[in-house]
Image: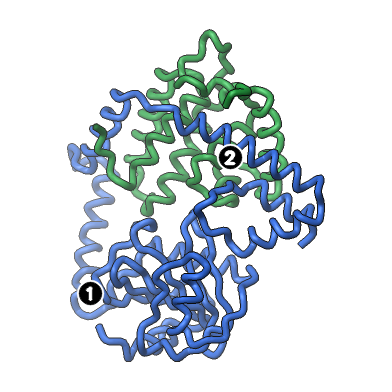
Amino acid sequence: MNPRTARGLLASYLDEPNEIKSPLVQKAMKALERSPELQAEFDEQTNIDARARKILGAAGVPFEVEESLASKVSALPAGRINPRDPAILAAGIGFLLLVLVLTWNFLGRPAAFPPDAAEIAERVIELEDEPLDPVGEPSGEVEDWFLMKGFDGFKVPEHLAANLAESGGILKINNQPVAVVTIPQRNARFLVFPAEPFGIDLPEGEWRSAPIDELYAAAIREMDGMCFMILRRGSLASVQDLIGAAPR
Amino acid sequence: MSHLPKDWRFLRSAWLFAAILSGSSTKATALLDSVFGEMISRHDVVTSWRRRRLFFAKLLRESSGLPRLAEADFTGPAGLFPFHELQEPGRSALVLLYFRFFAPEQLANVIGRAEKDLPGILANARAELAQKLPASA
């Protein structure tokens, strides 16, 4: 990466001393060292951001505004229903369809894949070309590798632990760390991330799976507040094969 | 004490954003009420991420015609006048960057610009802000 590219990338970066820097940011910062002028520019950026964020952080929202907002939100979603409102009519038809879908679910269709998890999968696919570090260990044995990089809790289901992790790293998705390893022999990636910051709440240990796009499918489960996701290049059936032998 | 649920806590930052854009606490509350009313009537916004993105984009759109106020007329929170003075789109880009809600490509989408233009927009905004921030900050 040349220093000018690095400088462009770091324009959208906010320095947080206690946060893990993504491999891309680390690479950019290293590239900047080759240009004292751009390094000085970036140092000035960091200085301005620190001053500005201190002021912004100290700005308060008036108490009465907060109370008003909380009151409005707590009033959701109950409201008056006008049956002649086309939106309500559409909602009524939608409700009937929902009943049909729930009946179908009860009859055995897999439960829904969390939309927020689907967004994470889409982002990881977009970041496919982001360089990762070599690992070369079974995926069940890289917890300490991630711990040294600042990510705690990288655990892989037992029946998948023997799969070799060729490379790994920590991606930043919506400012949250997502640990990822590549599993080339399965054409897959294993992802681990905390559930709560992404608003994901699944029954403990229960798998959900879904196609993500025409090329990828994913499966996810939550254990002790951490999500484990398999993102596989292949069909839904191919990812369900991987989780098929897992205890539920 | 406010009891905003987790998915709606961004409303605090949204109010600050509206105050920076409008220069007025009263106007900020009005803007927020307007966008909030519009958002809750939509049924196609499912995830909290999309809701947040749409909320800030709408705030920006609804405040686009508002004039810059002189410091004597500014009634937003203390200390935020330098932000109010900044030129768009840098003002919105920088403030939203500081709120840390959006990845760069999402931020560019909210302000209606190409992601490749973001570094230049942010650089100009920072340079402008640096001249306006008090030296003691």
The numbered mark at residue B57 is none
- Whether marks 2 and 1 lie on the same chain: no
Task: Work out which quarter of the rendered image holds the N terminus of chain B and state it.
Answer: top left
Residue for badge 1: A104
Chain B color in figure: green
Check disc 2 and report its element: helix, strand or loop: helix
> Chain for mark 1?
A
Crowding around mark 1 (Cα neighbors within 10 Å: few <14, some 14 to 19, many 20+) is: few
**What's under tag 2, amino acid-wise?**
Ile
Place of residue B124 in the rendered image (x, y in percent of width and height, measured from the top left): 71, 34
> Where is residue A200 drawn, in percent x and y?
33, 61
Q: Is residue B102 above or below residue B84?
A: below
The answer to which of A156 and B53 lies nearer the viewer is A156
Q: CA distance from mark 2 to mark 1?
A: 42 Å
Residue B127 position by quadrant? top right
Look at 64% across and 28% down and name the residue there. Answer: B129
The chain coloured blue carries which letter?
Answer: A
Q: Which residue is mark 2?
A: B111
Direction top: furthest residue: B72
Visible residue check, residue A47: yes
Instruction: From this view, report whether residue A141 is shown above or below residue B29.
Output: below
Q: Residue at x 74, y 42 (%)?
A: A41
- Label 1 amino acid? Trp
